[in-house]
Image (tube, helix red, strand yellow):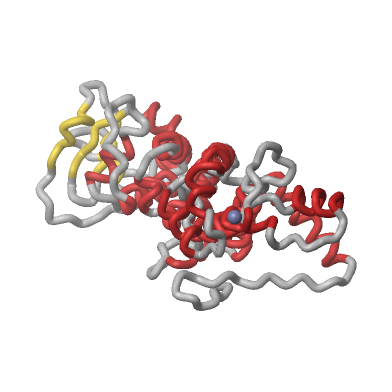
Amino acid sequence: MSSTASNHPEKSSSAFRFPDADLIIRSNDNVNFRVHKSIMRLSSSVLHDTLTLGDLTTLSTPSTPIVDVSEPSNLIDAMLRYIYPLPRHPLEDLRHIRRLLELGDKYDIQNIATAIEDLLLGNTITELYPTQFFALTKKFQLTRLRAFVETILVKKPFALLDEPQGPDEIDHITAEDIRRVEFYRRRRISSARQHFDLEGRTGLPMCECRTRQIIVDDYDDYQSEAERRKICQAWRTLTKICCEALDKDPTLDVTAKSLRELAVENSSCQDARKNLFHAYDVYVQHAQDQIKRIPWTFPLAYAEHQKLIRCRTNDGASIKFRFPRNSSGGRFKPY
Ligand SMILES: [Zn+2]
């Protein structure tokens, strides 16, 4: 709380001028917000102490006590809207959101962080600036929003590291955060790969690209080898292409025709096109359906993984974490 000299002419807030107000909050641009002491006391422990300890200016005319604050009127107006049941400004600006959170922290108004967290869950602005929002969730301990933003980060490989200019809260992002998001991403790719596994499927057409490679004397051996190998080479090529593409873009739709075209180009099987676009089409669709169901985060699996690492470390084994490569091929470095 500070008294601030200001050249701005004194004005009254149009929204906060309650006739029964018994307190004025004056912003640094000289706007008076006529509010209620009792509500301020209940909402903010800092304002409660200020009002209790008498750290305020009392003018004889008017006799309403004044609390001078160092923030501008637009921010105080936004803050008070989290205390009074008035329409709030839309959360469209990252800097504004950050300042509101800082204000909530400064004046210990817990409702601000909770309400902002609720409003941002599912808000598309978090997809535009996932690194910044992740850092904010760490700084202000917004655990629900952090879990939500993590799912966005898994969809954008290395977003935590690729940020050309780190957010103000960059120090709150740790190497473990990067490891955790990378763990989720790798885990997801590994699950996706399993959905391309056609071993044990019955009714698959035998492809010549496989049968002509089988050279055995015994008919039974031929049958068992043929069964083991019956999946066309082109399918394996497609699996590799899809997993590599999912690695770069975890939101990829593996039914995209371009992926199969690429697999045809890179396959030595002369029936690759016929197989991938017809006989195997149902399995491509199935893989996509299954991949869509894979969760984006695996907090329990990560906790187990961490436990395992701690056990190994305690046993004296050295655990090394290699930082992944970024989009331009350089090795990321820990902060
Ligand atoms: Zn084939």
Residue at image coords 65%, 41%: 204
Q: Please, is residue 273 above or below residue 49 in the view?
A: below
Q: Nearer the viewer, residue 290 or 279?
A: 279
Quarter residue 50 falls in: top left
The x and y percentages for residue 74 are: 23, 44
The x and y percentages for residue 298 are: 65, 46
Residue at image coords 24%, 43%: 26
Q: Please, is residue 38 above or below residue 95 in the view?
A: above
Residue at image coords 81%, 57%: 308
Q: Looking at this rendering, what residue extends furthest in the left direction? A: 9
- Asked whether residue 43 is in view, the answer is yes
- Asked whether residue 109 is in view, the answer is no
Q: Which quadrant of the frame does ligand 1 lie within?
A: bottom right
The x and y percentages for residue 191 are: 65, 48
310 lies left or right of 131 = right
Quarter residue 104 falls in: top left
Which of the image's four quarters has the C terminus?
Answer: bottom right
48 lies left or right of 64 = right
Q: Looking at this rendering, what residue extends furthest in the top direction? A: 20
Q: Nearer the viewer, residue 49 or 203?
A: 203
Residue at image coords 49%, 71%: 326
Q: Please, is residue 24 above or below residue 271 in the view?
A: above
The x and y percentages for residue 44 are: 44, 37
